[in-house]
Amino acid sequence: MKTFVTNLLLWSSFIAGLVASTASGAVLDGTAKTAATFTGIAVSLLTGSRIAKKPKIKAFLSKPSTLWFLFLFNAGVAAFCYLSMDGAKGIATAAGMGLVSLGAAGGLLTAHRAPTAKTTNQEPWA
């Protein structure tokens, strides 16, 4: 029961942070909008990083097919944002999505270079 409640709180906090960071402009103006946006970003980042450490999510995120999707999708979105948005907002969005794409590419490279376990016929104490 404790695990269920913990997961429920983590996921609901993550969703609340995403909603606060994206929808605060429809309700608030000025400083309150900025504060709600940045608080929502912080909450979603913190809870998202906790969720990503769960064994099932971690296993899903380390699969090569998931990493390839993240790499290609985020690289495409970064290029689209850079070409379609004007000014600093387009550059910042493209840079953020590019970093996510590079992170997925790094995961692909480390998974590719992971040493395989060698089996020998010798005893370990020999």
Image (cartoon, grey):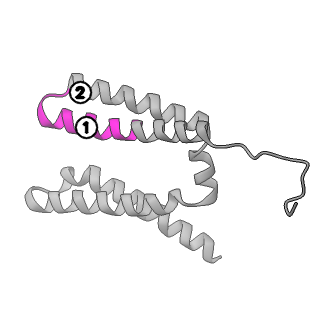
Tell me the residue that label 2 is attached to: 82
Residue 15 image-quadrant placement: bottom left
- Residue 77: x %, y % from top left: 35, 29
Q: Amino acid at mark 2?
A: Tyr
- Residue 46: x %, y % from top left: 39, 63
10 within the magenta span: no
112 to the left or right of 90 = right
Name the mark on residue 46.
none
Relative height, residue 109 to residue 17 (above, below): above
Contact between labelled residues 2 and 1, with CB atoms less than 8 Å apart: yes
Q: Residue furthest bottom?
A: 2
Q: Nearer the viewer, residue 25 or 6?
A: 6
34 to the left or right of 117 = left
- Residue 12: x %, y % from top left: 45, 63
10 Å neighbourhood of mark 2: few (<14), some, or many (≥20)? some
Tell me the residue that label 1 is attached to: 93
Q: Nearer the viewer, residue 50 or 124?
A: 124
Which residue is rendered at x = 43% and y = 42% of the image?
103
Q: Amino acid at mark 1?
A: Thr
Disc 1/disc 2 C-alpha distance (Å):
8 Å
Relative height, residue 56 to residue 46 (above, below): above
Looking at the image, is mark 1 or mark 2 earlier in the sequence?
2
Location of the N terminus by quadrant is bottom right
Q: Which residues are magenta?
A: 85-101
